Image: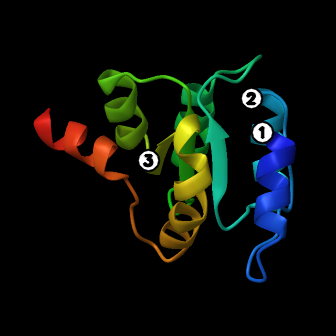
Amino acid sequence: MREGITAVVNAQPDMIVVGEAGDGQAAIQQFRALQPDVSLLDWNLPVIPGEEVLSTLSAEFPRAHFIVITSLDDDDCIRRAVSLGARAYLHKDMLRRELLPAIRAVHDGKQYFPEQIASRLKQN
């Protein structure tokens, strides 16, 4: 999945992947070293879960821009990610159509929630 995302992002004239991590501990280290404009964060990371990564980095870098990517379809998970500082939340099956618009919106300081996520946030 990371290779596909990297290829799509790097194919854009206005984007470049500056780092990758295969687990939560490496994600924290990479973020601290690189401080990217936008970070894509898998909620289901090994070693340190994505939720803990997001909590740690959002507290340390309150202006950071995170997009949570997950296969979980759970309202509590969506709300938790947003409360911890995620500016976008995408299910992995949404990536083909939503990834690039989400990155651009979050980079511009906006939130990005596809309609099916946004409607669930409004209901609760």
Position above or below: 14 against 120: below
Answer yes or no: is residue 61 visible: no
Position above or below: 118 against 81: below
> Which disc is residue 76 wearing?
none
Residue type marked 3: Gly
Q: Residue at x 83, y 71 (%)?
A: 11
Quadrant in which the C terminus is drawn: top left
Answer yes or no: is residue 69 visible: yes
Q: Compute the Cα span from label 3 to label 1.
A: 16 Å
Residue indicated by mark 3: 85
Q: Compute the Cα span from label 3 to label 2.
A: 16 Å
Q: Quadrant of residue 103?
A: bottom right
The spot of residue 23 in percent (x, y) is: 80, 27
Closer-to-camera residue (65/63) = 65
Q: Compute the Cα span from label 2 to label 1.
A: 5 Å
Q: Which of pointers 3 and 1 lies earlier in the amino acid sequence?
A: 1
Q: Which of pointers 3 and 2 lies earlier in the amino acid sequence?
A: 2
Q: Is residue 108 left or right of residue 12?
A: left
Could you say whether the residue bearing mark 1 is in a helix, strand or loop? helix
Q: Residue at x 78, y 37 (%)?
A: 1
Residue type marked 2: Gly
Q: Is residue 21 left or right of residue 113?
A: right
Residue indicated by mark 2: 24
Pointer 3 local density, CA inside 10 Å: few below 14, some 14–19, many at least 20: many
Residue indicated by mark 1: 27
Q: Quadrant of residue 34?
A: bottom right
Could you say whether the residue bearing mark 2 is in a helix, strand or loop? helix
Is there CB contact under 8 Å for labels 2 and 1? Answer: yes
